[in-house]
Image (spheres, rainbow, N blue to C red):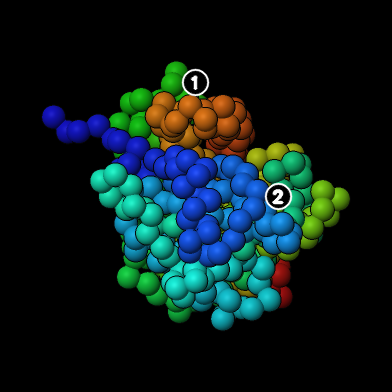
């Protein structure tokens, strides 16, 4: 019998290191002390650290199941961005006293990787509602700029398994589909063949390292009254994957509350394309890849709801209605008409 999926297989097993150990870690390796506040984390235990001087950092402790090379990859990516596009506002790696980017925290039987990043001030787009076309163009452009900055960057851990990548194989995983709730199954099953086909088609598209997680909660604006993207956070999902998947992930998130989802995706694509030009084949796949991202999100969030630690259950469960609603709305749109609209808008911007 095939073993059932474990949270560690998907890297959904953040550690729970007690506060005293985290404080000792900060003092020993970075020479700082301060107020510690919990931040949510799917794979890392994340802690906001505010010093008496007002400096703010994020301490990230990886699971024992995650290889150190993953943390090395993420640190290398942020260091690359600091060189490739210094004005791009992303977290910076804070070196330990030893000069290392990553330190080891020993548990009873193994070690965990710990690193410290700068904390970016700002407000996420979670509560922004439906954005204007110009704001959506700006959102797409911000992700395109990030993808452009990653051009040429390579790392030996870039091909490491990432469950959230659209080409990870998880959207076709039988166990995830079998274990869906009745609501999830009714919502997603009509689209299974379509999304599996779209994910398989990624094998023939352009690939590179991308952010891979440009959703509303990872893009920052200055205040709740503004919509310009000022920064990008959370590089935990970076991967070498299809470039067009990077845009599809961003699009799936920002169309969810928009009254005209097709027009919203077109605006995001126009912005992305203006910085990171897309080819015809990529545009042809985009509508179905947005659907693929939403279905994959439903599969993985339901899995987490069944297996996550108690302190994360409420937040995870709260995401499910949005995934189902977004899937129902986007799935009903004619993908051919959406693709024609995308080609028209992108052609228009080039004339």
Q: Which mark is residue 215?
A: none
* Up/down of 282 relative to 253, above or below: below
The residue sitting at the top extreme is: 182
Residue 198's spot in the image, x, y percent?
A: 41, 49
User: Does residue 112 show up?
Assistant: yes
Measured as percent of width and height from the top left, residue 2 is found at: 17, 33
Query: In 3D space, how far apart are the residues under numbered discs 2 and 1 (Cα atoms)?
Result: 29 Å
Q: Quadrant of the N terminus?
A: top left
Q: Residue at x 58, y 76 (%)?
A: 82
- Give me the disc on residue 124: 2
Residue 344 position, x and y percent, is 66, 61
Question: Which quadrant would the C terminus be assigned to in this image?
Answer: bottom right
Q: Could you tell me if residue 338 is visible in this image? A: no
Secondary structure of the residue carrying numbered label 2? strand
> Which circle's residue, 2 or 1, is located before the other in the chain?
2
Secondary structure at badge 1 equals: helix
Residue beneath the point at 55% across and 68% down: 94
Which residue in the structure is indicated by mark 1? Answer: 183
Q: Position of residue 90 (x, y in %)?
A: 62, 66
Q: From the viewer's perspective, is 273 left or right of 237? A: right
Q: On the image, which quarter does residue 117 sit in?
A: bottom right
Q: In this image, 185 relative to 224: left or right?
A: left
Count residues near mark 2 (Cα–Cα under 10 Å), then give few for <14, some for 14-19, many for 20+.
many
Q: Residues within 10 Å of mark 1 (few under 14, many from 20)?
A: few
Residue at 49%, 71% in the rendered image: 97
Q: In the depicted view, which residue is nearer to us: 333 or 102?
A: 102
- In depth, the one of 267 and 228 nearer the eye is 228
Q: Tell me whether circle 2 and circle 1 mark residues in contact (CB < 8 Å).
A: no
Q: Quadrant of residue 283?
A: bottom right
Q: Is residue 38 above or below residue 67?
A: above
């Amino acid at each position: 019998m095939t073993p059932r999926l474990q949270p560690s297989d998907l890297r959904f097993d953040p550690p729970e290191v007690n506060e005293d150990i985290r404080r000792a870690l900060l003092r020993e390796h970075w020479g700082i002390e301060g107020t510690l506040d919990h931040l949510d984390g799917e794979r890392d235990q994340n802690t906001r650290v505010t010093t008496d001087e007002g400096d703010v950092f994020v301490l990230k402790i990886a699971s024992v199941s995650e290889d150190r090379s993953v943390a090395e990859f993420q640190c290398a990516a942020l260091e690359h961005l600091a060189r490739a596009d210094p004005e791009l506002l992303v977290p910076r790696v804070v070196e330990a006293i030893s000069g290392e980017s990553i330190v080891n925290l020993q548990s009873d039987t193994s070690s965990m990787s710990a690193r410290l990043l700068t904390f970016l001030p700002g407000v996420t787009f979670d509560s922004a509602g439906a954005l204007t076309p110009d704001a959506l163009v700006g959102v797409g452009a911000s992700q395109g700029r990030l993808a452009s900055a990653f051009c040429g960057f390579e790392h030996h851990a870039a091909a490491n398994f990432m469950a959230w990548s659209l080409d990870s194989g998880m959207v076709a995983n039988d166990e995830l589909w079998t274990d869906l709730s009745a609501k999830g199954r009714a919502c997603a099953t009509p689209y299974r063949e379509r999304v599996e086909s779209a994910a398989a088609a990624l094998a023939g598209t352009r690939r590179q390292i991308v952010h891979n997680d440009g959703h509303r909660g990872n893009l920052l604006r200055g205040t709740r009254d503004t919509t310009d993207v000022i920064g990008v956070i959370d590089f935990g999902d970076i991967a070498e994957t299809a470039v067009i998947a990077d845009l599809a992930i961003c699009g799936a998130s920002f169309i969810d509350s928009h009254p005209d989802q097709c027009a919203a995706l077109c605006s995001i694509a126009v912005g992305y394309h203006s910085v990171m030009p897309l080819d015809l084949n990529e545009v042809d796949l985009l509508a179905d890849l947005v659907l693929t991202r939403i279905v994959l999100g439903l599969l993985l969030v339901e899995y987490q709801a069944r297996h996550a630690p108690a302190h994360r259950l409420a937040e995870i469960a709260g995401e499910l209605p949005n995934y189902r609603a977004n899937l129902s709305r986007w799935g009903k749109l004619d993908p051919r008409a959406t693709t024609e609209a995308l080609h028209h808008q992108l052609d228009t911007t080039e004339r």
